[in-house]
Image: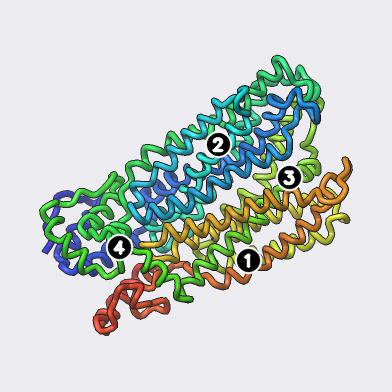
Amino acid sequence: MATKTAGGNAAFHNFHNDFSHIQDPNERRRLALAEIDKAPFGWYHVRAIAVAGIGFFTDAYDIFAINLVTSMLGVVYWQRAKKNPGHIPSTSDTAIKVATSGGTVIGQVGFGWLADMVGRKRMYGLELILIIFATLAQALSSSSQAISIVGLLIFWRVLMGVGIGGDYPLSSIITSEFATTKWRGAMMGAVFAMQGIGQFTAAIIALIVATGFKGSLESAAKVQNCSGVCGLAVDKMWRIIIGFGAVPGCIALYFRLTIPETPRYTFDVARDAEKAVEDVKAYTSGLPEGKPDEVSRAAVLQDSRVRLDPPKASWGDFWRHYGQWRHGKVLLGTAGSWFFLDVAFYGLGLNNTIILQAIGYTGGSNVYHIFRNAAIGNLIIVCAGAIPGYWVTVATVDTIGRKPIQLMGFTILTILFIVIGFAYNHLGHNALLALYVLCQFFFNFGPNATTFIVPGECFPTRYRSTSHGLSAASGKVGAIIAQVVFGPLRVKGHPTEANPSPWLNHVMQIFALFMFLGLFTTLLIPETKRKTLEELAGEVPGTPNYDPETAGHRESSVLPDHSSGERDLGEKAV
């Protein structure tokens, strides 16, 4: 019998002592994880959402802010350009933006793998440090005779992208593994929905700094004439906008560095049953980590490592696991859906200039009005479709389900892109604006949210982070294709001032095909609503997903009464 520990009260229950009489480490594991799964929604859940969500707020802020900043860079660094002075060249603009996506792919795969190898706790916070450092470095960058501002920004944005990429698998799986089963989708959706708030804040900060430097900006009628005090003001503006992205990260950093390890990782990968049970108590008590009795821990540690059921992670086990179609198709479904989504999601941004023209927020009588209108226009775009879509998902994902929302989203988006693509030349600005807002809404009340949620739930603990990272990385590859391939493709033909993107309608038609293909990859993923992570991983006997090999059970060891107990536990957790 395990040694009892001191502490515990009505507010912070001592889960360890509840299970101290249980000798079987597998039984202790099931009971401890059930406490997390069936826990009522509380402040510790809100705290987990806030700590993880601030990371996504920072990620979205940094990515969205560069769309507003590149026009400012054109004013500062291309003022004396022979061609199109005051405007950044399209190749430089694309390179700066794609650099972030390239770094993100590296971070998603690298941090995803490391979180499975060395633990969630050890990696969580490191990606935020990288984001903060690279963000501040960008804000302090300047060109010289030896290196251009584009080269510097690309270097720092690749590093920042690595940090942003790491935040995807880490925030998703940490939220998932600490969440109550009943509201797990809403918790993960709320973390992801902070992207919309980050985009909104980036536009707000741009509007504030434009207003703050109003007097200086009004001294120039056009960007090509913005020199002297006007140029100095714009140089300060872009640095403030970029640099502010580090502020929320600094606030969240302490909390990320002091979270306890997720009990599921401690049970299934570290195979330390005593520490895992204590970490459950620490999480619900708001403490950094559990502190088990070391004598008791040493006594049961070796036994736990031998007797705990889930297989140990290894390359051989990884290929064996995903080599089976029943498991491999899930990874194909999550990665493929995210890829098809991001091609169109990032490609839809190619319409932003036209949409801003439609609502009358492009250009202006002087540089102040140009930057002010750009900030307000982007605020309207974010508020009109993106933010409502995120929060409708949060409200419905645990009742409607992930798979129906994703299927519905891909279906509606296929129809919307067909309409935009084939009727493009017959649509007025108002009609195009309405279709754009609908696309933004059903991206976020649809596959943009669910492709983030599902990979954090449907894989076994030992490969959950790696699998989420691979899925997210495939999405970012789609984003790079949208920016590098479809961006230049839209100007194919004979662009004119009246029609600068003659091939844009055909690009929208191609996006409709990608949305249609997303329907088929969605059919490969399971419905994860109101199911425990262990049931989804195939570890609970008597459930449709049960796989004795994945659970580490020998068929002869799964007795009927033992199966019944596990099945009952899974039902109670739901």
Which marked residue is nearer to the observer: mark 4 or mark 3? 4
Q: Which of marks 2 and 1 is in front?
A: 2
Circle 2 packing at 10 Å, graded few (<14), some (14-19), many (20+), is some
Q: Spatial distance from mark 4 to mark 2, Cα to Cα? A: 38 Å
Mark 4 neighbour class, 10 Å CA radius: few under 14, some 14 to 19, many 20 or more: many
User: Which label sits in the foreground, 3 or 2?
Assistant: 2
Among numbered discs 3 and 1, the one appearing first in the sequence: 3
**Of the numbered discs in the image, which one, if any, rests on residue 518?**
1
The span from disc 4 to disc 3 (Cα, nearest Å) is 47 Å
What residue type is disc 4 on? Asp
Q: Name the residue under label 3.
A: 352
The answer to whether 274 appears left or right of 313 in the picture is: left
In this rendering, is residue 390 above or below 156? below
Asked if the residue at tag 1 contacts the one at tag 3, i.e. Cβ–Cβ closer than 8 Å, the answer is: no
Mark pair 1, 4: CA separation: 33 Å
Between discs 4 and 3, the one toward the N terminus: 4
Q: Which of marks 4 and 2 is nearer the N terminus?
A: 2
Q: Check disc 4 and report the residue beneath it.
A: 268
- Residue at numbered disc 2: 155
Residue 216 on image: x %, y %: 70, 17
As drawn, the residue found furthest toward the front would be 146
Q: Do the residues labelled 1 and 4 touch (CB within 8 Å)?
A: no
Q: Position of residue 309 (x, y in %)?
A: 27, 70
Tell me the quadrant of the picture where the N terminus can be found: bottom left
Q: How many labels does the image show?
A: 4
Q: What element carries label 2?
A: helix
Q: Is residue 405 visible?
A: yes
- Give the mark nearer the N terminus: 2 vs 1: 2
Would you call the spot at circle 1 few (<14 residues within 10 Å), some (14-19), or many (20 or more)? many
Q: Residue 167 carries which label?
A: none
Q: Which of 33 and 316 is in front in this view?
A: 316
